[in-house]
Amino acid sequence: TIRAVSTSHRILNKAKLRESFRTAQAYITGQKPVPIWQNRVPEDDIAKMHAQQLKGRDMTQLIEQVQEANATPESQREQRTNLFMGLQAAIYLFPKTAMQLRPLMAKGGIHDMPFRIVVSALSGVGNGVSQGLLREAIQRRRGEPLIATHLVSNLSDVPNPEPKSVAVVLDIAKTAKHPLFRHGAELGLGTMALMLRLNQSERALPVVKYLVNTLKAQTTHKRKIDLLRALGNTGAPETNDVLGPYTNEKDNAMRAIAVSAYRWNPTGMADELLTQFMQSDQDPAVRQEAINAYTFRPITDKAKTALCIVALTDSEPALRLGAASIVYRIRHRQPDLSSLFVIMANQDADEEVRTKVLNFV
């Protein structure tokens, strides 16, 4: 949405620009309880924006520019955003030309700019060709766990995962020996379930069921935390029963991860649990996770009240400031919140909090 707003003034008419700004503001203030990954920009307008970013270049020219920009750290910093946007545009508008990117994916690693921006561009577009190239690269580089995990993460982020993509990541989760590679695949499955829930919820359910059953089979502390993280990525209401007991764990780290796992969960029960934990849990890390969840969730009236209470009363300055920062998002539709910032700017016990909240005022 932000990209649409920043670009549309050059290529769209004023009516569409106003619509883009209204949509952006609705997301930012929480007025639209719509997942942030949902694409609201019409396909024709996306194509126009990509054409603007392409600037008349073809894939061959873009690849040459990527290789030239890789020469020095300075040129990498200067060119990477422009080249990333150009690659995305070429992949979106001319999918078959993406096949030319194979050599850049076959070499290099996560610290090499050409590899990184090519993989990110493919993930950002996420069309069939992009997913096919990412799957191919995962299989080719499966013996390099760090690189393969990076590729899995990018494949998992595509907006509409194909069945073949889900199958590849599921196979890795089941068979990978390297713990990082396996956990990366589990996190990726959770993200894929979240993406699928929007338009193909029936495909998300088997993925959620696999992660739930895998969690139930674990006996070690570390693996339970791994699977709680993965389940948190799904945002699935079906996880409520399995997550519930972990929110009562004595272990602070496990309880914090369990609370964090409700961040995408759209149910009223999740709202109730998060507002309760941000106000009453004894451990600051747990309270922090409950607060952070509202950077992803719509801020309900219950959440607004709880966040205001935390901003005024929590013992930790970072948590008071964090709660105030989230409440600040909805100031446009809750003008009465200005009094909260005035009180904090004048009365908070921490000088840094007072200074930063004064900027809100």
Image (spheres, grey):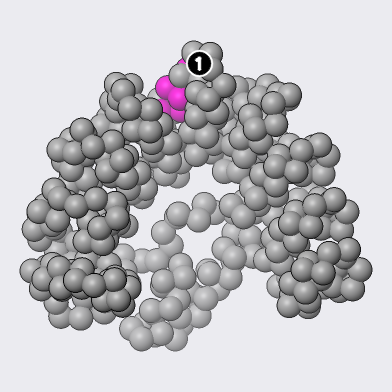
Q: Is residue 186 left or right of residue 297?
A: left
Q: Residue at x 84, y 72 (%)?
A: 345
Q: Which residues are magenta?
A: 207-213
Q: Secondary structure at mark 1?
A: loop
- Which residue is labeled 1 in the image? 218
Q: Answer yes or no: is residue 164 visible.
A: no
Q: Residue at x 84, y 51 (%)?
A: 314
Q: Residue at x 70, y 47 (%)?
A: 288
Please give the count of numbered marks on the rendered protein: 1
Pinpoint residue 16: horizontal percent, then vertical percent: 43, 78
Q: Is residue 157 above or below residue 229?
A: below
Q: Is residue 191 above or below residue 341?
A: above
Whether residue 210 appears in magenta in the rendering, the answer is: yes
Task: Please name the amino acid that badge 1 sits on.
Answer: Gln
Magenta segment, prevailing SS (helix, strand or loop): helix
Pinpoint residue 280: horizontal percent, then vertical percent: 83, 39
Pinpoint residue 101: horizontal percent, then vertical percent: 13, 57
Q: Is residue 182 left or right of residue 247?
A: left
The C terminus lies in quadrant: bottom right
Pinpoint residue 309: horizontal percent, then vertical percent: 85, 54
Whether residue 268 appears in magenta in the rendering, the answer is: no
Q: Residue furthest front?
A: 72
Task: Assess disc 1: are there few (<14), some (14-19) or many (≥20) residues with their C-alpha within 10 Å of its C-alpha.
Answer: some
> Residue 304 falls in which quadrant of the image?
bottom right
Q: Is residue 21 left or right of residue 339?
A: left
Q: Which one is nearer the viewer's eye here, 15 or 244?
A: 244
> Residue 295 falls in which quadrant of the image?
bottom right
Q: Which one is nearer the viewer's eye here, 9 or 145?
A: 145
Q: Residue at x 46, y 19 (%)?
A: 214
Q: Answer yes or no: is residue 326 visible.
A: yes
